[in-house]
Image (spheres, grey):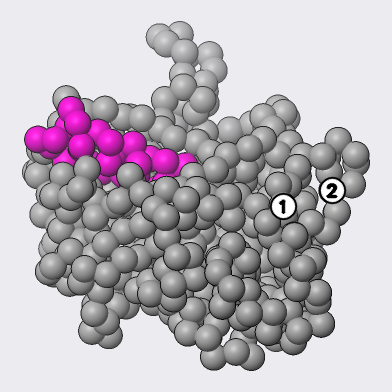
Amino acid sequence: MSSVGISGLAAYLPPYRTNLEDWCEWTDGSWEKLKDVVGHSFRMRGHHQNVYTMAANAVLKLIQQYNIDPRSIGYFGFGTESSTDNSAGAVIIKGIVDQGLRKLGLPPLSRYCEVPEYKHACLGGVYAMKGAARFLAFDGAESRAIVVSADIAEYERGSTGEPTQGAGAVAMLMEPQAKMLVLDLVKSGTSADYRGPDFRKPFVRFSQQKAATNSQLRDYPVFNGYYSTNCYIDAVLVALSNMFNKRGLDRSAYMKNLAAVFLHRPYTRMPETGLAMSYLFSLAMGKAEDHAELKRYCEAARVKFHDVLEELGSRRDIYACVESGKLNTPLFSRSLRVTRVLKRFETFRHIEEKMSLGWELMKDVGNLYSASLPAWLAAGLEDACKRGVALEGRELLSLGYGSGDAAEAIPMRAVPGWQAQARKIRFADAFAGAVDLNESQYISLHGGRQPVDLPIHTEGEFFISRVGKSGNPEFDEEGIEYYGFNPAQTDDEPDNDQQAGAESSEQQSRNV
């Protein structure tokens, strides 16, 4: 597996944008606080879009931007927690993409292709990537793989999660001889444990909803904020510990020498917390000089050094908080207090700088669940290429997380000539054509309805054309979604299929 990895990335974001500064005005929120904790804006899908259309759009962009022969793809993996079908998964996206490829005069994806879907909250995309790497290292060594991560993050209005919404997809090309990033799975770290009500989407929530073309099923999660933070920190530290122990690393030296770090990023503050806790952990598990550095931070935070050492080094039974009915038990209170003073110290500012690649652009991505980490990788590599950052031969660390809880610490290495592939990512292009929502439009889209004053544009994209209904005498198709594709116009007159798609979209808007 020494050369297996990522050779290309492409992203798709739906056009409907909610500016969080505007959202704060609608909800009497604090923009000064929110812009530093959450970000600047997020995207929302239209009622003609779902997780499969967004994924298909990202895959088509990947194929076009990297001039991929679809017949060379032997593995087509999909990571998501927003599926609307409990039977089929990645094969739906394959079928949608094949439809578009045929309309563009291109061959479809190979029929000799595996099509798995991976689900584990926000970690599904990372698991799909690992599955593709294993395929390419063994029976798929003569082919290539496409992995796409796509999700729709929705929270009830008035909840603490509401400003951390988002929608979008990221596709990646993976090859046995990677042209951008090599994955070192042999030296990666992993962790998993059951956490009960950490962040869940029990199916009973859908029982009273009805699928229709002019409305969308709502996918609001059940979540417990403080408890989920404990789960996140614990999972990341255990995965790091697993990686450190496998490699016999000098933990703090490793963190200081990394070229870049990319973490799961549902909102801005979470990776900041994750990296700070990871660095404190590397010091706590380190040598005498590491302990001396940690003591300085503890003194600045007015926290006892040995209390922090015990907190970070002890074995934690987080599920006991559920069994005792005390989900708000402060398991990392002392360490978190220390993280609040770290920015005063130049040593940690140097560590934090390792998250700078793509940092600002990600503030306008929003929460993409399983696509959050792949999106940051795409943004970071494009940013590094534009800024001329030297990454060749250096190690990058990705820290993925999925509620429930599970985490993956995967080291990557930039290969010679990685810039040529990074220039094709065109991540910034995914932000083009944004349509800023007003309050009433936001409320309508949030409720699953397309506002009558918000046009539907499907040129060059896939869309839901209709949803099957019960009572069809020929065959049962209730709730099954059917899809269309409008090739981008190349002349003044749209073709017949494109015109039909536009008329279908206009009819959907009138039905709202």
User: From the viewer's perspective, is residue 148 above or below residue 41?
Assistant: above
Q: What is the x, y in percent for residue 3? A: 18, 50
Q: Residue at x 53, y 39 (%)?
A: 120
Amino acid residing under circle 1: Ser
Residue position for label 1: 314
Disc on res. 327:
2
Q: What is the x, y in percent for residue 385? A: 24, 77
Q: Is residue 424 left or right of residue 380?
A: left
Q: How many residues crowd mark 1 within 10 Å: few (<14), some (14–19), many (20+)?
A: few
Does any portion of residue 481 appear in the rendered image? yes
User: From the viewer's perspective, is residue 403 above or below residue 399?
Assistant: above
Q: What is the x, y in percent for residue 33? A: 71, 81
Q: Residue at x 25, y 74 (%)?
A: 391
Earlier along the polypeptide chain: callout 1 or callout 2?
1
Amino acid residing under circle 2: Leu
Q: What is the x, y in percent for residue 85? A: 49, 28
Q: Which quarter of the image is occupied by the N terminus?
A: top left
Q: CA distance from mark 1 to mark 2?
A: 19 Å
Q: Is residue 433 left or right of residue 213?
A: left
| Residue nearest the observer in this picture, 152 or 410 | 410
What residue span does the magenta drawing correspond to? 123-151
